[in-house]
Amino acid sequence: MALGQALTLAGALFLQPDKCEFIVLGTPEPTSEFLQLLNLYRQGVRDEPIAKLAGIHHDELKFFRHRVLLVRDMAAPGPRRTVEPNDSCLEAASLLETELAMTQVGRSRWEDADSHFDEAWQISFLIETPVDRLRFQRNWLLAAGLFYHQLIFVSVAEEAFMRAGRLLRNAVRLYPNDPEVLLAAGSLLEWSGSLRWGVAAHLKEAEELYSRARRFAPTDPEILLRHGWVLEKLEKEDEAAPPLRRVLELDARKDLTYRSRMVLGRMAERAGRLTEAIGHYEAAADTIPSWQVAYLAAGHALHASGSHERAREALDHALAMDLKSADATLGGWWSYELGIALRFEPLFERLRAEVMR
Amino acid sequence: MRFRGFVLFAALAPATQEQRPVFRVSTEAVQVDVFVGEDGRAVRGLALADFELYDEGELRKIDSVTVAEVPLNVVLVLDTSESVAGETLAHLQRAAGAFLDELSPEDRAALVTFSHHLSLRSGLTSDVAPLKQSLEEVEAIGGTSWQDALFCALEMLEVVRERPLVLLFTDGADTYSWLREEQMTPLVGSSNAVVYAITRNEGAPLPDVQTSRAQERFRQNRRERVRRTRLLLEVTRESGGRLIETESPDWLQSIFLDILAEMKTRYILTYIPQAPVREGWHDLEVKVKRKGVDVHARRGYYYEARR
């Protein structure tokens, strides 16, 4: 063993972290800093490794990372393997890259973020146990896609939508029978297809994804609601009503019941069945009294029916609602668009928790 | 039986301010709130003989023309979504405040603000002090739902007999309204109110980067601006009001004050339709026997029999 290699090994052993049991031999460049930070991350310390690595120029960081990953490449010349990195360590490395990507997004450095996300995805292929790899990649794709999806709502729609779409479509391609994946991808396309300046064809795509999701989760109220609503948006009202009514029969979350009522009300109103529409809107208001839109919708239907006094009562009530008490930030329609996207955070938490075990 | 639409009920009707008017052929009259402009300025001094009014294409006898000295009932409907945060909101607050200061003691005003949430900050009142206080308290947050807000304002004015006016400011596309675009024009058409709208038009900046994405973003922004403007134009025309676009929030105050001055120079034409009145929509057209003038008046009214 050359002197240089021995010294490197000695240094690496001296700094060898407890849990991430691999070191790299034969490289004159240090890898210990990256390993140390990786282990801190695995122990649940997030801010320090992320801040430190985010401060390193991307090309330099790539170098560190490659030194680590080379140990997995048995055929590669040069550095030789001593102890193989375990799957948990690779998951941590992938997640750390993901965190760096998100940090770069926070700085609006989209291309840098793309590189980190790409690295994270490539690292995930090194996870040896197939079940672990599939589980990790499924959750990672979903979380990363939803991370970009929620960014759409903080004024970076174009950049975020493009990336969210790429990640979620990839998830659908790899996990075509996973209702949660189909729901997430469908919600992104539904959002895009529902916008006035959006892509109308995306509504149809969303409908297909929800339809497929229903085959694998036929009593999931969230999928039923979204499928029903997207059918209503596509003006297939006969097909839209059954899944929406089914939501009312299930013991669904209040927001899902509320929205099913609202969409059923809208369809009834459009068909001129104003009494039925008013009934749905009033039932929605009873379900979540602090959400404003049911009162507005009832006001409009009552106005159309000629019940002007009652219309004004409903609108007076709506207008008197306090912005804060109405839970308006996440209540009402915001939570429909944003709700699924915000699941990126619990997904990442789950992934982080798994590497800490 | 009753008129819904632009129809205001003449002094013979015994209704009080807060009662819904009831159409009675012998006593009821149709009133049309008209602005006549020339080169952007109000044309004053017109008399009955200067006007022609067509109901369903037929020339009708106008019974009276008055210059609008009747008190105003104004609902200010102001965008407080996130996109107006900062300088625009400060200009908007100043503009609305100046508008309130210029109202006559007999005029009444209300304040509705909207983001993704609608708030009635103050109901119709001739005491502008609490209104101005409310203006100071608004914060800019969230999305935009001007269509829902306009509907609420129109409904508030349903019970008002005298000069109902909506002054709407929005600087963004509607993203959160329950009501859809196609519902707005009929709603305005069935209301008594004249709607003025002010919107931001920051021009059409050319894409700074000649990439396909930049070009597409440019085209998308332009399409959205055109679409938004078209709907606002449609609803304001339907009501006999106007849409004013401004490139800078610096000009909001002068625009608000110009609108108020315009409201004070409008003419009110009154005529009594001859029975039997056909149920349904009636197209209206007001002409002025003078060349080169612009006439802004409601396009029609809806008459329905009370059952």
Image: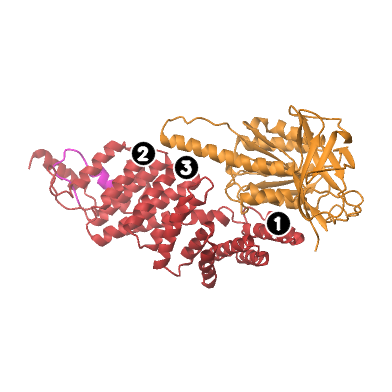
- Colour seen for chain A: red
The span from disc 1 to disc 3 (Cα, nearest Å) is: 34 Å
- Name the kind of residue labelled 1 in the image: Leu
Give the structural element (helix, strand or loop) at label 2.
helix
Residue B246 position in % (x across, y down): 64, 32
Q: Which chain does the numbered disc 1 sit on? A: A
- Mark 3 lies on residue: A156
Give the structural element (helix, strand or loop) at label 1.
helix
The residue stretch that appears in magenta: A22-37
Q: Nearer the viewer, residue A236 or A140?
A: A236
- Name the kind of residue labelled 2 in the image: Glu
Q: Considering the whole magenta stretch, tell me its main secondary structure.
A: loop
Q: How many marks?
A: 3
Q: Nearer the viewer, residue A278 or A208?
A: A208
Q: Tell me if I can see residue A352 in this picture.
A: no
Dividing the image into 4 quarters, which one contains the C terminus of chain A? bottom left
In the rendered image, the vertical position of residue B105 relative to residue A189, given as above or below: above
Q: Tell me if I can see residue B14 in this picture.
A: yes
Chain corresponding to orange in the figure: B
- Give the quadrant of residue A281: bottom right
Q: Is residue B87 left or right of residue A38?
A: right
Residue B284 position in % (x across, y down): 77, 44
- Name the kind of residue labelled 3 in the image: Val
Q: Earlier in the sequence, mark 3 or mark 2?
A: 2
- Mark 2 lies on residue: A111
Residue B181 position in % (x across, y down): 62, 49
Q: Is residue A340 on the magenta stretch? A: no
